[in-house]
Amino acid sequence: IFAMDTVISGWQTDTANVLRWIGEQAEFSGRPIVLYGHSLGGLIALCHKDPDKRIAARIVFAPVVDAVGNLRTTILGPDLWQKSFRGEPIANFYGKAFSLQPQFVQDLAENRYDPLRDAESLTTPILIVHGTADVAVPIEGSHVLFERYQGPKEMKVLEIDHVAAGQHGPWIASIVEWLDRTFPTV
């Protein structure tokens, strides 16, 4: 299922559908909606268009801000990138047993998602969390994101890897503390 469902444009549709559903639920009325995304989910959170101004804030953890560059050079590598781009399924990349259908890479190449460009027009508060031991997604991208982001912003640099393996305490604490400061009456 992961291989078939992993497409950024599909995840964008899923996000819009979830937000539409939340808007229809009385129990969420008047509550702030915070988009959270990790890695490629960070790309989704940053690229989500919000014409109705429903999003109160965003939190991104190790966000992919250069999807094509990061996937082509680090996560997949040039050979698997080209194989997928040519329409072949790929598997066992980045030391994991994942597989992807070619529509993932083709969607990235065709749509050229640019969260850094999109961040320049965002004005809601954002928390950026990134680890110094992240070898999957370079922390430099989060620094550039912080520089370009136009709204209230905070960046937490922690001594964690890409998934905060064994270090969930500091990661979660930084998010909860930021949420408490950003939304003190909720």
Image (cartoon, helix red, strand yellow):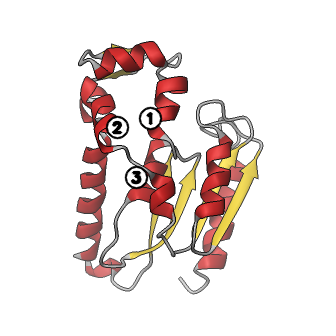
Q: Quadrant of the N terminus?
A: top left
Q: Secondary structure at mark 3?
A: helix
Q: Which residue is mark 2?
A: 108
Q: Is residue 67 above or below residue 17?
A: above
Q: Which residue is mark 1?
A: 68
Percent of width and height locating residue 61: 58, 50
Q: Is residue 158 left or right of residue 26?
A: right
Other residues around mark 2 within 10 Å, as few (<14) / some (14–19) / many (≥20): some
Q: Which mark is residue 163?
A: none
Q: Secondary structure at mark 2?
A: helix
- Which amino acid, mark 3? Ile
Q: Report the front residue among 38 and 27.
A: 38
- Which amino acid, mark 2? Leu
Q: Which residue is mark 3?
A: 44
Q: Report the front residue among 186 and 11.
A: 11
CB within 8 Å, label 2 to label 1 = yes
Q: Which numbered disc flags the more N-terminal residue, 2 or 3?
A: 3
3 vs 1, front mark = 1
Q: Secondary structure at mark 1?
A: helix
The residue shown at (34%, 65%) is: 49
The residue shown at (29%, 27%) is: 3
- Which amino acid, mark 1? Val
The residue shown at (24%, 69%) is: 20
2 vs 3, front mark = 2
Q: Which numbered disc flags the more N-terminal residue, 3 or 1?
A: 3
Give how far apart the Cα atoms at labels 3 and 1 are: 14 Å
Other residues around mark 1 within 10 Å, as few (<14) / some (14–19) / many (≥20): some
Percent of width and height locating residue 113: 38, 47
Give how far apart the Cα atoms at labels 2 and 3 are: 12 Å
Q: Which numbered disc flags the more N-terminal residue, 2 or 1?
A: 1
The residue shown at (42%, 81%) is: 31
